[in-house]
Image (tube, rainbow, N blue to C red):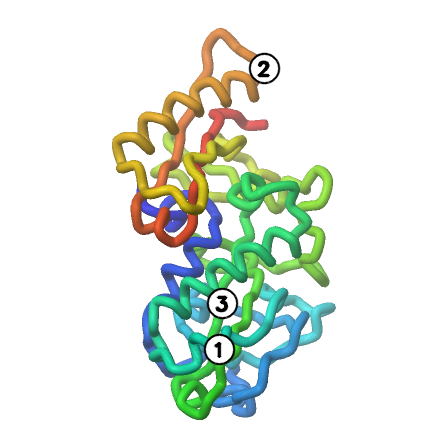
Amino acid sequence: MTLARATVACALAALLTLAGCSSEPQGKNVDPDQVDSTEIPELGACRVLTPDDVEKPANSTRTVSCKEKHTAETFAIGEFPDELDDVDYDDEAVGDFAYRTCTKKFEKFLGAADESLVLRTIVSWAWFRPSEKAWDDGARWYRCDVVGGNASSEEYRPLPTTAKGLLLGRPDDRWLICAVGPTVAEGEKVPCAQEHDWRAATTIKLGEPEDDYPGDQVVASRTKAFCAKSIQAWLNYPARFEYAFTHFHEAEWQAGNRRSVCWAKTSE
């Protein structure tokens, strides 16, 4: 299966979706003061973003009060390191830095116990850079937003007043990902608080950050073997059970992902 677009919420989707270099427009309900701004965005700002908005590398959607309905919250801001001052607007190194930075801060912001839980949540993140004009004027900031959905979402769900600590302790099923359908691949991804047929229950770590990609066959084989045992244990060792798994490929490995997802056939 390819990426989270067909499977689970995952920060990888944000990196690969936004890797293009399209320019205008910069979202709906645009604030003219933000369009070509060279100033670092506001931390904690909330917006009403859509999946179409996060397909663009830059975004200037007006902010709203976080007490009002919103689908995005800025959880990290900053400037790119000095070595990226002279790179092109769509240089791969810019995306690599943003992915590493936003991924680490996303897990901490949500209060997730580990990266496995982050991979199984219905929320994900997107990152934005300045407009091309602002980049040419010397702006080198990034903005990481948590959004109420994933790469397969047709629309985003409203977030709470703040998403900080959303996954602390035992997360509410509203924020965990399940699927409805005969198979995970064909099923619609929904929050586990809704009726569902499958739950993303566990993950398997397939390597360390410095490891080379082991190849599709190895990844699939190791994932299948682990998930069979893991899901049987998660279901308390029933005599018969159904499970599925999602494994990613070399592009996602190079982007930083080292995990596959195990799904249990369950309505619980």
- Tell me what residue is drawn at x 42 percent, y 50 percent: 256
* Front residue (pair 204, 234): 204
How many numbered marks appear? 3
Q: Quadrant of residue 218?
A: top left
The residue singled out by tag 2 in the image is: 236
Kind of residue at disc 1: Asp
Q: Assign the N terminus to one quadrant of the image.
A: top left
Seen as rendered, the residue at the extreme top is 239
Mark nearer the N terminus (1 vs 3)? 1
Q: Is residue 120 above or below residue 5?
A: above
The residue singled out by tag 1 in the image is: 82
- Tell me what residue is drawn at x 53 percent, y 88 percent: 38
In the picture, the disc for residue 110 is: none
Q: CA distance from mark 2 to mark 1?
A: 52 Å
The residue singled out by tag 3 in the image is: 127
- Tell me what residue is drawn at x 39 percent, y 66 percent: 18
Q: Residues within 10 Å of mark 2 (few under 14, many from 20)?
A: few
Kind of residue at disc 3: Trp
Q: Could you say whether the residue bearing mark 1 is in a helix, strand or loop?
A: helix
Mark nearer the N terminus (2 vs 3)? 3
The residue mark sitting in front, 1 or 3, is 1
The residue mark sitting in front, 2 or 3, is 3
Q: Could you say whether the residue bearing mark 3 is in a helix, strand or loop?
A: strand
Mark nearer the N terminus (2 vs 1)? 1
Q: Position of residue 246 (x, y in %)?
A: 39, 36
The residue mark sitting in front, 2 or 1, is 1
Q: Is residue 102 above or below residue 222?
A: below
Q: Position of residue 160 (x, y in %)?
A: 69, 58
Kind of residue at disc 2: Asn
* Front residue (pair 264, 88): 88
Q: CA distance from mark 1 to mark 3?
A: 19 Å
